[in-house]
Amino acid sequence: MIEIRNVYKTYKTPDGPVRALIDVSNFVKRGEVVVILGPSGSGKSTLLRCLNHLEAIDQGAILIDGIVLDDSKTNINKVREEVGMVFQQFNLFPHKTALENITLAQRVVRRRSQKEAERIARELLEKVGIPEKANAYPAQLSGGQQQRVAIARALAMQPKIMLFDEPTSALDPEMIGEVLEVMKTLAQEGMTMIVVTHEMGFAREVADRILFMDGGRIVEEAPPQQFFRAPQQERTRLFLSQIL
Amino acid sequence: MDFKLSILIEVFPLLLQGAWVTLYLTLISISIGLVIGLILGVMRVSENVALRVFSLCYVEFFRGTPLLMQLVVIYYALPSLHPRLNLPAVAAGITGMSLNSGAYIAEIFRAGIQSISKGQMEAARSLGMTHLQAMWYVILPQAFRVSLPPLTNEFVALLKDSSLVSTLAVSELLRKGREIVAWKVNVFSPYAGVALLYLAMTLPMTKLARYLERRVSEGRV
């Protein structure tokens, strides 16, 4: 479903180039839930953002469903329709209600009728547990509610893959649970998910596989049981001892 | 000082005619300027280098040269290139004012667009929208709110600058005043009326700009 082949990515910063991804390769199967862990600056968010081409890669290749992302012949908008993304800062459209946030891309990109788009939007608001907030503006919602609307907005495109970029990092502790709950449900329904997070409980419980990144490389890769009980790499053990 | 209230009252209806010309010159020009400015502002943040450079050159040219020069070139110099470019004075005035305000409005929209957080564009693109769709449905509605106060100020500036069109023999407010000065052989009374009428048009707009500014900063537009 997602194939990452020897990807390199370097950022130019005022202090000189920063190597964000170094020879990263991986394969994510359909229906798999992959959690990426790692210290900040390890390249995990960069990797995620490369998967829907919010960042271009320097070398290597990323294939989504067999389609090469960094190919001038690829219509990146078509690929993105199939890849939903949830951001740390929610990024809801502040001038639109929750319902409008969810219907906009359906109408503009999927060309659905207003009625059809609204029906789907209301179903999804139901699914994420806030049907009563359809007409609220983002500023009137709590962080947890905003993030759930953002998830519904991405799901409305009926993507094949969902990317989560630290979806709970900007939330007050008491709201983290409600968002993770929605993500857990999605995982159980068989959605292919890649999640960058610091929520170890979620990783342990929901992930099929954990990737541990450090310094732009995938340092270790294992099922959660093995990853948390018997990490192979010194770097992983150090990381786990610091956060657990 | 030769101010006489009786003369001011007598010529006031004529000055009103001039004020009306000033107002419609400004309204038409700002409307065209808004369209030009919107297109140039969006080009300025485009992914295409050629569009960005074109927009930049346009803006720098029209902001870097005086409006009076632009008006004179359009009215007096263009007809020598081709007889079809021989515009009537009012049309030449509107053309110059529109092209000029387009440059200033482009800068206002550019600043407005760039004030919207990058995450908005990313969220829209991640849903499969094209750059232009994201601009139109997500970025511009938000940028426009931010741009409202400076746009109101630009309207005031343009209204005052429309006095330059008097050099093309268009009977707008200033020109009307000058004609009456010659006719009545009285300087202060007509010009007092001219000033009053300019203020009557600009003060409410300045007040509106301040009100909008407050609303925008409170996030309530």
Image (cartoon, rainbow, N blue to C red):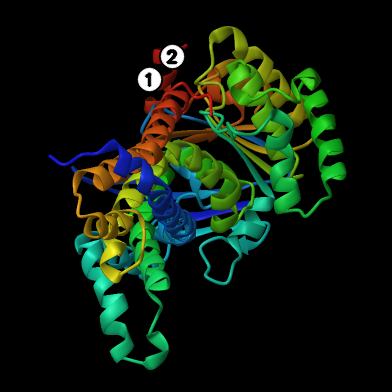
Q: Write down the quadrant of residue B100 in the picture.
A: bottom left
Identify the residue at image location x=52%, y=45%.
B139
What chain does badge 2 belong to?
Answer: A
Identify which amino acid the numbered label 1 is placed on.
Leu
Identify which amino acid the numbered label 2 is placed on.
Ile
Task: Tell me the crowding category of disc 1: few under 14, some 14 to 19, or many 20 or more residues within 10 angstroms, Cα based.
Answer: few
Percent from the top left, x then y, of residue A89? 51, 28
User: From where the camera sits, is residue B116 visible?
Assistant: no
Identify the residue at image location x=52%, y=53%.
A53
Percent from the top left, x then y, of residue A117? 81, 42
- As helix, strand or loop, the secondary structure at mark 2 comes to helix
User: From where the camera sits, is residue B118 visible?
Assistant: yes
Q: Nearer the viewer, residue A220 or A3?
A: A3
Nearest to N terminus: mark 1 or mark 2: 1
The circle drawn on residue A238 is: 1
Label 1–label 2 contact, CB within 8 A: no
Identify the residue at image location x=61%, y=12%.
A175
On screen, residue B67 above or below A202: below
In the picture, which quadrant includes the N terminus of chain B? top left
Percent from the top left, x then y, of residue A94? 58, 31
Q: Nearer the viewer, residue A11 or A112?
A: A112
Write down the residue under mark 2: A243
Q: Write down the quadrant of residue B67 in the picture.
A: bottom left
Q: Write down the quadrant of residue A164 in the picture.
A: top right
